[in-house]
Image (spheres, helix red, strand yellow):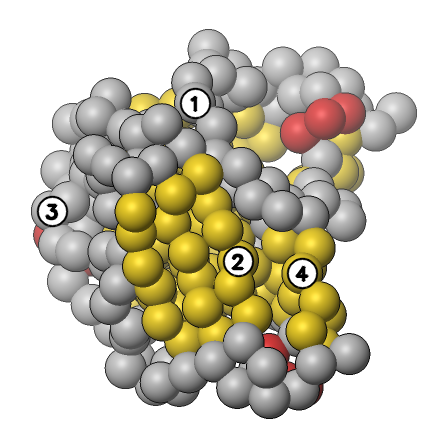
């Protein structure tokens, strides 16, 4: 099995840019997906295939990839973006894995 | 509208068994691989298992391998997760989730059910 590593927490003020990283050895070979989960709610896909944004997700959410690290960037953070964020990827054996999650706090 | 509805959760003693179901609607069920993802109270997401669109391929996390069995009935648009030899650490909300891409065994999840709570305790 393999692991994806995320920082436990990130804090930003409203209007600033939040960057949440996810690191893993398999990331150069497999796509990464990002989910937002607010308390008591179901996870929502916010970025797929490293950089693509599903319909209905605000443009301030973007993704990028460099080597073994992928980054979720939220530009112009709003209070409603406060949530837990998880990265997810897979390996060629058919198994998937989630990162440990990052709690985004909007100060 | 895509809908996923899990059922079958509840309280079970350690060593016991439980079968979860997930009924899908709003998409061509037989063309999508599906997964179970769980979340222990106050903890992060953990991928549990995946099944191919036909049901011919199944994949498991090491933590459940040999104890859980994932199956599907495409004629009923339903998934099943048979959980045996349950342990306290299996306590979690269990979500079924739909793959983003048709026929893709790997990838992300674009729709999730509301989840069903499994509690393993004596």
- Give the spatial CA distance, label 1 vs label 2: 20 Å
User: Dot 3: what SS?
Assistant: loop
Instruction: Name the residue beneath numbered marker 3.
Output: B103
Q: Can marks 3 and 4 be said to lie on one chain?
A: no
- Quadrant of the image occupied by residue B49: top left
Check the image and report above or below for A96 versus B77.
above
Q: Which chain is home to disc 2?
A: A
Check the image and report above or below for B100 versus A62.
above
- Give the spatial CA distance, label 3 vs label 4: 36 Å
Q: Residues within 10 Å of mark 1 (few under 14, many from 20)?
A: few
User: Dot 2: what SS?
Assistant: strand
Instruction: Name the residue beneath numbered marker 2.
Output: A20
Q: Earlier in the sequence, mark 1 or mark 4?
A: 1
Q: Can marks 1 and 3 be said to lie on one chain?
A: no
The x, y position of residue B100, in whole percent, is 24, 58
For the residues carrying marks 1 and 3, which lies nearer the camera in this image? 1
Q: Which chain is home to disc 4?
A: A
Q: Which chain is home to disc 1?
A: A
Please identify the quadrant where the C terminus of chain A is shown.
bottom right
CB atoms of marks 3 and 4 within 8 Å: no
CB atoms of marks 2 and 4 within 8 Å: yes
Residue B99 visible to the viewer: yes
Instruction: Name the residue beneath numbered marker 4.
Output: A10
Instruction: Name the residue beneath numbered marker 1.
Output: A2
The x, y position of residue A105, in whole percent, is 72, 70
Q: Nearer the viewer, residue B23 or B66?
A: B66
Q: Residues within 10 Å of mark 2 (few under 14, many from 20)?
A: many
- State the residue at coordinates (18%, 51%): B32
């Amino acid at each position: 099995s393999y692991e994806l590593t995320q920082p436990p927490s990130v804090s930003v003020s409203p209007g600033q840019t939040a960057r949440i990283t996810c690191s893993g050895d398999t990331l150069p070979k497999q796509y990464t997906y990002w989910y937002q989960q607010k308390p008591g709610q179901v996870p929502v896909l916010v970025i797929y295939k490293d950089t693509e944004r599903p319909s209905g997700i605000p443009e301030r959410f973007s993704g990028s990839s460099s080597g073994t690290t992928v980054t979720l960037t939220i530009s112009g953070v709003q209070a409603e973006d406060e949530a837990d964020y998880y990265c997810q990827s897979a390996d060629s054996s058919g198994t998937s894995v989630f990162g440990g999650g990052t709690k985004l706090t909007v100060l | 509208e895509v809908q996923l509805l899990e059922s079958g959760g509840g309280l079970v003693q350690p060593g016991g068994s439980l079968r979860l179901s997930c009924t899908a609607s709003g998409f061509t069920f037989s063309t999508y691989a599906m997964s179970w993802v769980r979340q222990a109270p106050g903890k992060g997401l953990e991928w549990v298992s995946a099944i191919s669109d036909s049901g011919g391929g199944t994949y498991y996390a090491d933590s459940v391998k040999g104890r859980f069995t994932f199956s599907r009935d495409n004629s009923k648009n339903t998934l099943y997760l048979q959980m045996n030899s349950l342990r306290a650490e299996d306590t979690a909300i269990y979500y079924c989730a739909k793959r983003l891409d048709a026929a893709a065994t790997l990838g992300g999840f674009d729709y999730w059910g509301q989840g069903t709570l499994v509690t393993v305790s004596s």
